[in-house]
Image: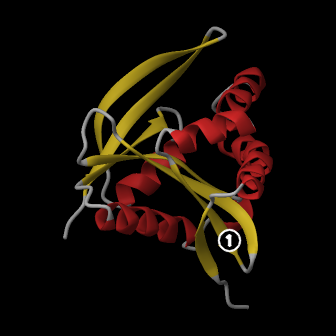
Amino acid sequence: MEVIVKFTAATTQKDLLAIHNLAPELWQYAYENILSAAQIDYMLEWMYSIKKLNENIENGTNFFLIEVNGNNYGFIALTPDKENCSTVILDKLYLHKNFHGMGIGQKALNFACTWAKEKNFTQIELHVNKRNLRGQKAYIRNGFTILRSEVNNIGNNFVMDDFIMGKKLQD
C-alpha cells in the first residue's frame, strides 16, 4: 500500500482541536520513559490547550498537520526566533508511533527546512530532551548538531532539561 504524506497548514479552530487531541497520545509515547506522568500532564495542559495554541499562532507560530493517507497522525510547529531574525525554531515535530521508521519523520524535517528556506531563514534550531536519545539520533542523522545545553524552569517544580540543536540551511 502506498503511503501518501501531506503537510497542511493548521489555521482553523478545527485544525487546532486536531493538534490538541493528538498531543496526549503522541506525547505519551515520546516521553513515557523520560518524564513523569505528572510532568507530561502538566506540559500537555501548558502547551496544548486550545487557548495556548491560539496564543502561539497570534505570536507567529506556524502549525502544520501531518496527514498520512488522509488522516492526521502528527504535527509540526515552526516559530521565528524573536532574538535572531535569521533563525526559525522547530518547536514541535510529533508523529504517531505507527508511522515511525517509514521515512515520514524525515519528510517532516525536510518539509520544515524547505519551508524555513522559502521564508528566508538561514538556520533552524530545536530543543530536544537530553534523555531523548531516539530524537537526538534522528536530528543528528539529518545534519543537526548540539549547540548548547539549557535547563529551564517551567513551573510546578518541573524543568525542561534540553540540548539546543541547530542546522544551517543551505541554498
Which of the colour schemes (rainbow, by chain, secondary structure, one colour) is used? secondary structure
Looking at the image, is 169 positioned above or below residue 159?
below
Looking at the image, is 37 positioned above or below residue 94?
above
Work out whether residue 59 or residue 8 is closer to the camera in this orientation and state it: 59
Judge the density around disc 1: few (<14), some (14-19), many (≥20) Cα neighbours within 10 Å.
some
Q: Is residue 102 left or right of residue 169?
A: right
Q: At which x and y percent is residue 76?
A: 56, 55
Instruction: Name the quadrant containing residue 147.
Output: top left
Q: Is residue 70 left or right of residue 155?
A: right
Q: At which x and y percent is residue 42?
A: 72, 23
Residue with the mark numbered 1:
67
Work out whether residue 122 or residue 135 is closer to the camera in this orientation and state it: 122
Work out whether residue 140 or residue 20 is closer to the camera in this orientation and state it: 20
Looking at the image, is 44 positioned above or below residue 168?
above
Q: Residue visible at 76% across and 51% down?
A: 22
Q: Residue visible at 68% across and 71% down?
A: 67
Q: Secondary structure at mark 1?
A: strand
Is residue 171 something one can see in this rendering? yes
